Amino acid sequence: MGKFVGKAVKRREDARFLKGAGTYTDDIKLPKMAHTAFVRSPYAHANVLSIDIEEAKNEPGVIAIYTGNDACGEFGVPCGWQVDFKNGETMREPAHPLLTKDKIRHVGEAVAIVVAETLEQARDAAEMVMVDYEELLAVTDPKQAMEAGAPLVHDQWEDNAAFDWCIGNDRAEVEAALESAHHVTEMEYRNHRVAPNAIEPRSYIADYDVNADKWTLYTSTQNPHLIRLLLCAFVLGIPEHKVRVVSKDVGGGFGSKIYHYTEEALLTWISREIGRPVKWTSDRSEAFMTDAHGRDHVVKSKMGFDKDGKIVAHLTDEYCAMGAYLSTFAPAVPTYLHGTLFQGVYTTPLIHLNVIAPFTHTVVVDAYRGAGRPEATYLLERIISKAAKEMGMDPAEIRFKNFIPPFDGVEEAGYQTQVALQYDSGDYHGVLERGLEMLGYEDFRKEQAKAREYGKLLGVGFSSYIEGCGIAPSAVVGALGARAGLYEVGHVRVQPTGKVSVFTGAHSHGQGHETVFAQFVADKLGIEMDDVEIEHGDTDQVAFGMGTYGSRSLAVGGSAIIKSIDKILEKGAKIAAHKLEAAEEDLEYAEGKWTVKGTDKSISFGDVSLTAYVPHDYPEGLEPGLDFSSFYDPSNFTYPFGTHIAVVEVDSDTGKVDVKRFIACDDVGNVMNPMIVDGQIHGGVVQGIGQALLEEVVFDEAGQMINASYMDYAMPRADDIPMIETDRTVTPCPHNPLGVKGAGEAGCIGSTPAVVNAVVDALAHLGVTDIQMPVTPQRVWKAMQN
Amino acid sequence: MQITLTVNGKQYSNDIEPRMSLTQYLREVLDLTGTHVGCDTSGCGACTVSLNGAAVKSCTLLAVQADGGELTTIEGMANGNEMHPIQKAFKEHHGLQCGFCTPGMVMTAANILKDNPNPSEEEIRHGLEGNFCRCTGYHNIVKSIQHAAEEINN
């Protein structure tokens, strides 16, 4: 496209981060800013009998203490997605209060907040708040939550189901096909709960300006405009134009910072009450107790095959935890972001998925990197590998046999799945072929056989994933229960000097938008990157936006910017034609200037920009200025895909799994900056390896998370993983102007099953056919003993 | 309690609460907000600074323990506008994404290279095991440190 797109341009945001000069929310200090500490429940399920704040109120520095009995106790945060029962019953949607006054439903639920002059004073006084609880039995497991007699999370309903939903073909038809299948592979397992763990804990500062009657909320969110909308219109009932949400540097999100949390609404309310700015920053244990978790599915699945190894039917039943309340996107995650990917990359003719989503006495579960798609991929890629073993087929062969044939979405139509979606374009063979080459498959099998002779356990695991990204066409998601549109806004302001300010509703919390967006804007306009500035994360600067998640920034946000640039070039051409005394259709635009075709007569972008703002000699009837904003609503999701291959060595004495090689061959459509795409893949892959081998949120019987600190929760460290070998194929997205598909989640979606498949492969000769994640040394050792 | 210490070459003397952590002192008293808090149990390393030439987790040290000490924080790594070779290498090799763990990574990298100017990949990974990064998968951090070592040694 030009001189920047496709190049590994170094990031412009790096200098401030490397010098320690980033501005994360907790770095902001406002005059007269008060500090807060929460009083949180130590119980998962309890009645609150009394809350005594008298002694605490008299502690030094205390400005105010609020409980659910104050006016703020009337407010609650909403859910953004409605998924109804398959029998037509409406989704059960409990109130989700900012502070709880009567019933505790998870450990860490807030009962009071202390506001004080300093953080230490707030924390000291919070210790003095006396809450009398009556502890009740709790249920944290989604399947157990649906058993008769399970403790009810919300006792206004007869059981814990938030909804019971299904997708795909008629169940009876799928069951019949399984009955008559040549071979049926079954699996039962848990896609266990993990904690997203952005390294920057959530942080909020609400600043109410009494003179202007306006708020500024500084927040570590992925989603500033949506937070403002929810906060104003659905929680506090304050006018949206009175609130500015600022979310500049954010230290990672991975989904956990998409949602509107109770704390940010409560602080906004408190700031007006006390007439001062007020701050809260989560500590790590609070983060474990209150940030939305991910996954937590209990799965039972059957896949049927004909005698040639072709899939004939797939039936799955799942219990997917919602947690104590319904978080912003929670109902969509195990349904429309999960069931719709059950086609995978295969031609499976019959599919049925049933999801029961129970409330549990735990913190909420919501989208975590990949959101529903890693869970779908894990299932498909594990079960097809298990089937291959059972049927004596090679795991690559069974995949090749079942792949959907290549289609570009232009000449060949998109692929209509059995589960609602139509894939845009894909070549699933290509990425597996390339992955096998990178691995050196034949040689590996020889090495593996030889290694076994010496008692060394090597294994290889494959994963051929697809995901739905570029979220999302508004009408489609609206029909599926979303209570918001999922378009994006791109505003391009050409300054009189020809310098360009771009305002995007997408949000960067590590993705490098300031660099990547400037690359394609500069190329499209034929100007230098230095002449382009990218602004995000401030609702006063950007008209509107839907934030960043679901690998949507470039596919949706980038497209909105392109739309605005098209408008600028169209208007610029009118000005250029006037100045050059030529017809518009005789002009061509390249390298930052309009030229009369076949002549050397031209006018630069800068001169046209100046003319637009100093319109002395100007086309009649044309408005001055060169400034356009556009909304882009995608016509479809995008569907990145790829093959991930893990090579592991299992220690035969201890059961420890060592990832020796990890190969990722991804297709994310066109690539704007290969350095950044690779970086996204690396990070995603390692998060996926983390779930496969190390990470798990563990609750005890009382509902206490017993590993809620970095001393106890095992995340991948540098010495747990190898270098990641990456390559890619390019199948452009046919329906957006940049041809991009999104790369943010791919790594995390493809990697997990590849690792577990590799462990099972390493142990296959010992009769091991499955192993529960996280694949800890203890589990492996036990599997080897059996 | 009164403490006196040198941070990034400048001497400071302050009266502080004995329970104040070194991170809080740097962030709240000196406004050096480049040192980050990711956990407060020494688990994540985002708060790593150099105290008397050794990398320490400032979140689990009291400020009073650093009394009389000489500290370097991320703000003291560059020489004016000239970034330290480790900082340059992180930029060149995309060793950071969201940037939150980055100051701790850079300070830890400096410590690794001080003790071992020619570390192997394994030694670098071992040296980084006290620091979490959730964005990069460590790949490009390791690469950045390898290149920084080359640059410094030349």
Image (cartoon, rainbow, N blue to C red):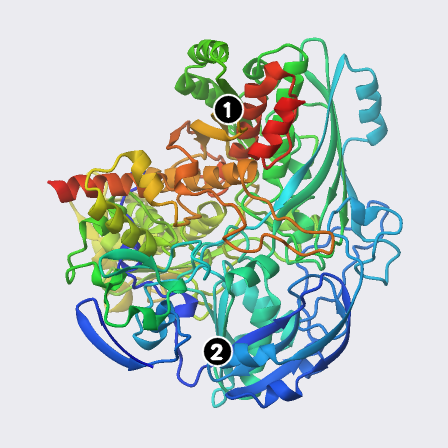
Residue A242 appears in view: no
Q: Which chain is mark 2 on?
A: A
Circle 1 residue: A427
Q: Residues within 10 Å of mark 2 (few under 14, many from 20)?
A: some
Q: Position of residue A111 (x, y in %)?
A: 67, 73
Q: Residues within 10 Å of mark 1 (few under 14, many from 20)?
A: many
- Is A740 left, or right, of A329 in this rendering? left
Q: Position of residue A238 (x, y in %)?
A: 60, 78
Residue A163 appears in view: yes
Identify residue type, mark 2.
Glu
Q: Which chain is mark 1 on?
A: A
Mark 2 vs mark 1: give the one in front.
Answer: 2
Residue at image location 39% in from the left, 61% down from the top = A249
Q: Quadrant of residue B68?
A: bottom left
Residue at image location 53% in from the left, 33% down from the top = A750
The disc label shown at residue A120, or none? 2
Q: Position of residue B26 (x, y in %)?
A: 32, 70
Q: Position of residue A654 (x, y in %)?
A: 53, 29
Residue at image location 68% in from the left, 79% down from the top = A130
Q: CA distance from mark 2 to mark 1?
A: 58 Å
For this rendering, which residue is in front, A101 or A225? Answer: A101
- Is A496 left, or right, of A667 in this rendering? left
- Is A232 left, or right, of A571 in this rendering? right
Q: Quadrant of residue A418?
A: top right
Q: Is residue B150 above or below residue A286?
A: above
Along the polypeptide, which appears first: circle 2 or circle 1? 2
